[in-house]
């Protein structure tokens, strides 16, 4: 059997495809492809994708990756898919979208979420799904689509239209409509799925918006064959699709965080921290969410997750909004021009504050400016602001789990910034481990697919393939940490 996997990472702004060669002692990226996905903004607070444009970006990136790897489709052992999790669409049996997909960032269902809370449903929803009632998640999006086009509900009852998150859409297209499925990780992000009983919950479907069960995909495990390719440009028929997981769960898997207490943080546009909590879901008491990390066979593993809305995006803002730098990679060099922030604090609440604060009304704050403040001080404060947000997340995780984390594994574009990673280690008092492959989201999809087709026999074999590249050890005194955290929390209170 070939040991080459095609990993599809379908994200909010584009689709990345990797051809990954897997071995017992490591993994190697042979080729990469990328194609942007346009976002559509029909009204303030509304964000949409065209499902056809997502499919076009996928086939484009796929062809680029195969060409870059000098690999033909027939040489692939399997396909793994990871995706932006809560983005939701509806299409007909012929694969024609009936409306643009509503993106996870979209806030149009905020009134419905407020109504659900006012009606007293919040605790029931949270206890069964592990989630907070927020427009971020998929359930109120599909309810909105059904409300706007009442005939869709009748068509759904007749089995004529189908709902899905982006993994479901890609599998449907890859299999020429043969497979209408999702995996447990994506299902757990919908507000419609009971994460303890591992099934769609008809009571939640009714509460959220009378969502017909006939509309929903079959839920499968994260590492099993769910279909085979048929009629895909550039690929032969019959390649197994064998790994599925939402992007953050895929990153946790790609970081080989297989033991309870192991944690990772992905630094992208926002930042997402997850800690493996094992086989029993624990409801967060600190504003985090409980989610399915993956399901392999009959075993479900859970995670506690916290997300910040702005991480790398604050660097983009310094680049595009203020003109501090011409390229995002320049931020580290600029920040290194000064030994500290000179008392400047930057709270990057440019789109509100996420977990554990959940303050959508919060706005960015720049405090502590003096006549001596330079661009370098503000750049360093921006990087520290990213790290201090993660400090708040992990502080909440420690309280929720009752355990003290020892190591944080990191990935994503900003994880390449050594200054940020060192400050993150300092402020957390944890070792930071950076892997050789920073594309751990796609790598997680490849690992799951490898399990699905038997290249790897178990997670222990996957763990051996994970490769450490750099370690950052904390070297800041407790007094210094306390000063940083107190100054940060005072600024957050004013944001």
Image (tube, helix red, strand yellow):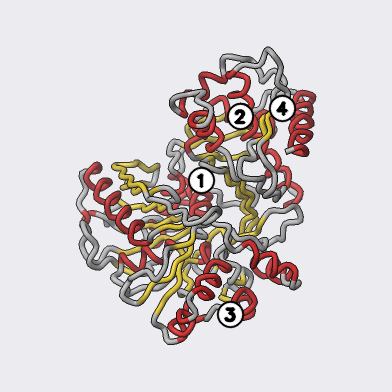
Picture residue at 64% right of the left edge, 80% below the top:
203
Q: Position of residue 54 (x, y in %)?
A: 36, 57
> Which residue is under mark 1?
255
Q: CA distance from mark 3 to mark 1?
A: 38 Å
The local crowd at label 3, few if under 14, some if 14 to 19, many if 20 or more residues have their Cα within 10 Å, is some
Picture residue at 56% right of the left edge, 43% below the top:
270
> Which quadrant of the structure image shows residue 125?
bottom right
Mark 4 vs mark 2: in front: 4
Q: Position of residue 410 (x, y in %)?
A: 54, 39
Mark 3 vs mark 1: in front: 3
Instruction: Say if mark 2 contacts mark 1, CB within 8 Å.
Output: no
Where's the C terminus, which quadrant? top right
Q: Secondary structure at mark 4?
A: strand
Q: CA distance from mark 4 to mark 3?
A: 47 Å
Does residue 114 sit above or below 391 in this rendering?
below
Q: Which mark is residue 210?
A: 3
Q: Position of residue 248 (x, y in %)?
A: 52, 51
Picture residue at 68% right of the left edge, 44% below the top:
393
Q: Reading the chain from its start, which is encountered first: label 4 or label 2?
A: 4
Asked whether 419 or 125 is in front, the reply is: 125
Asked whether 271 or 114 is in front, the reply is: 114
Mark 2 vs mark 1: in front: 2
> Which residue is under mark 4?
367
Does residue 238 sit above or below 331 in this rendering?
below
Q: Reading the chain from its start, which is encountered first: label 4 or label 3?
A: 3
390 relative position to 76: left or right: right
Q: Position of residue 192 (x, y in %)?
A: 59, 71
């Amino acid at each position: 059997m070939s040991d080459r996997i095609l990993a599809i990472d379908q994200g909010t702004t584009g689709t990345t495809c990797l051809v990954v060669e897997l071995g017992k002692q490591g993994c190697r990226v042979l080729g990469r492809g990328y194609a942007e996905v346009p976002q559509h903004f029909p009204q303030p607070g509304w964000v949409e994708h065209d499902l056809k444009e997502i499919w076009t970006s996928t086939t484009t990136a796929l062809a680029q990756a195969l060409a870059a790897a000098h690999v033909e489709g027939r040489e692939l052992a399997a396909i793994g898919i990871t995706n932006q999790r809560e983005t939701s669409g509806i299409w007909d049996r012929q694969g024609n979208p009936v409306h643009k997909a509503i993106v996870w960032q979209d806030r149009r269902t905020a009134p419905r979420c407020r109504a659900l809370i006012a009606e007293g449903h919040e605790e029931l929803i949270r206890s069964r799904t592990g989630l907070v009632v927020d427009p971020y998640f998929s359930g109120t999006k599909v309810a909105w689509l059904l409300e706007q086009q009442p005939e869709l509900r009748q068509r759904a009852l007749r089995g004529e239209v189908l709902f899905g998150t982006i993994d479901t859409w890609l599998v449907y297209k890859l299999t020429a409509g043969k497979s209408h499925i999702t995996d447990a990780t994506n299902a757990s992000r919908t507000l419609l799925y009971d994460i303890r009983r591992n099934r769609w919950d008809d009571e939640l479907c009714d509460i959220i918006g009378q969502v017909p069960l006939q509309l929903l995909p079959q839920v499968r495990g994260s590492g099993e064959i769910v279909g085979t390719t048929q009629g895909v440009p550039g690929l032969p028929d019959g390649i197994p699709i064998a790994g599925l997981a939402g992007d953050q769960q895929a990153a946790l898997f790609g970081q080989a965080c297989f033991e309870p207490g192991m944690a990772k943080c992905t630094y992208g546009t926002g930042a997402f921290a997850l800690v493996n909590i094992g086989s029993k879901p624990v409801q967060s008491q600190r504003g985090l969410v409980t989610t399915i990390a993956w399901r392999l066979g009959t075993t479900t593993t859970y995670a506690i997750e916290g997300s910040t809305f702005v991480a790398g995006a604050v660097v983009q803002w310094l680049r595009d909004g203020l003109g501090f730098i011409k390229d995002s990679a320049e931020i580290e060099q600029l920040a290194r021009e000064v030994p500290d922030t000179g008392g400047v604090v930057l709270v990057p609440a440019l789109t509100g504050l996420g977990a554990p604060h959940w303050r959508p009304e919060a706005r960015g704050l720049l405090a502590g400016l003096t006549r001596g403040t330079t661009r370098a001080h503000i750049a360093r404060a921006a990087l520290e602001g990213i790290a201090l947000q993660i400090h708040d997340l992990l502080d909440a995780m420690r309280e929720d789990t009752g355990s003290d984390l020892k190591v944080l594994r990191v990935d994503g574009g900003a994880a390449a910034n050594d200054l940020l990673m060192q400050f993150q280690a300092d402020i957390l008092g944890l070792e930071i481990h950076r892997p050789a492959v920073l594309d751990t989201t796609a790598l997680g999809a490849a690992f799951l697919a490898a399990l699905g087709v038997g290249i790897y026999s178990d997670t222990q074999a996957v763990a051996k393939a994970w490769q450490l590249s750099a370690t950052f050890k904390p070297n800041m005194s407790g007094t210094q940490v306390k000063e940083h955290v107190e100054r940060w929390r005072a600024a957050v209170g004013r944001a």
